[in-house]
Amino acid sequence: MLSFYHVLSTLSAIPNVTLNNGVIMPMISAGTWQYDGPTAEQVVKLALSLGYNHIDAANDYNNQVSVGAGLKGVPRSSYFLTTKIDSQQQSKTAYDATMKDMELSLTQLDLDYVDLMLIHFPPTGNDQYCAAMQEQWRACEDFYKAGKARSIGVSNYCPSSFECILKTANITPAVNQVEIHVGMGPDPGGIISYCKGKGVQVQAYSPLGDGSSEPISGDLVTGIGKAYNKTGAQVSLHWVYQHGIPLSTKSTNPQYLTDNKNAVSDDWKLSAQDFATLDAATSPSGHYSFKCTK
């Protein structure tokens, strides 16, 4: 019987993107949101066995110990690990609290470093808390300089959030992880073009929608999928990928995980007409951030 690591080494490679500091990030990750401990550990092991090499976690998912258990014994250089910390509102304590949360993540994951550390979201009413956001980002920079994160970034950040932290930043965020899916258009709220102008890589979460079945089994995506012998979900995921945007998906089903991984591939491509049709879709709607709008 093939060993676990032999299986990993013989599976097809996942495409990568190079971040603004030269770090190479896989274009798809297996997410762990909403999973209890045993499920999170199982999903991590399953995803790795199916060829995933990027796991997406977060401090407030409350399952990082189990994510770490799923990674136990796996060669560290063989996977990319993203995790996230909560925002801070008090400028006097933001630096220390952020450092504490990042160190806690390393302890829970039982790792010496993470590949990407994200601030999960800006504070509600982020204009009011700009000083705290700047202090939090300063902590992330120091964590990065200490070699405890290979790259640092943000999630759910709007232009106003960036304008705040970039006033004092020495390091530009490598990633902004936001909601992107078919129905939101090719540049929702202008966030993709904004980030591109700053040298920030956008990454998509909820690429199959946020509670709607349309990007999975809707007439539009399933109809297009027939021409490529792909599922509706694969069409939706490939649309994101064909825009050059990495994405994070989640499932406990081996077939769905495999289908998702196979959607992120250069082995097939949506035609210009199909691509434009998906660009023009307006349902399901959504906003790239649940925390800010401008």
Image: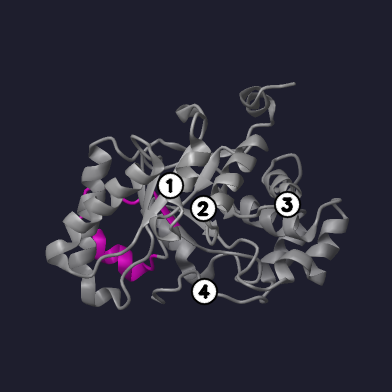
Residue 210 lies in quadrant: bottom right
Which residue has dot 4 on it?
A: 287
Given the image, on which type of amino acid does mark 2 rest?
Gly
Range of the magenta residues? 157-176
First in sequence: mark 1 vs mark 2? 2
First in sequence: mark 3 vs mark 4? 3
Given the image, on which type of amino acid does mark 4 rest?
His
Q: Is residue 168 magenta?
A: yes
Circle 1/circle 3 CB separation < 8 Å:
no
**Residue 129 image position (x, y, % from top left):** 22, 72
**Residue 211 image position (x, y, % from top left):** 64, 73
The residue located at (26%, 50%) in the rendering is 140
Which residue has dot 2 on it?
A: 37
The local secondary structure at tag 4 comes to loop
The residue located at (66%, 22%) in the rendering is 3
Given the image, on which type of amino acid does mark 3 rest?
Tyr
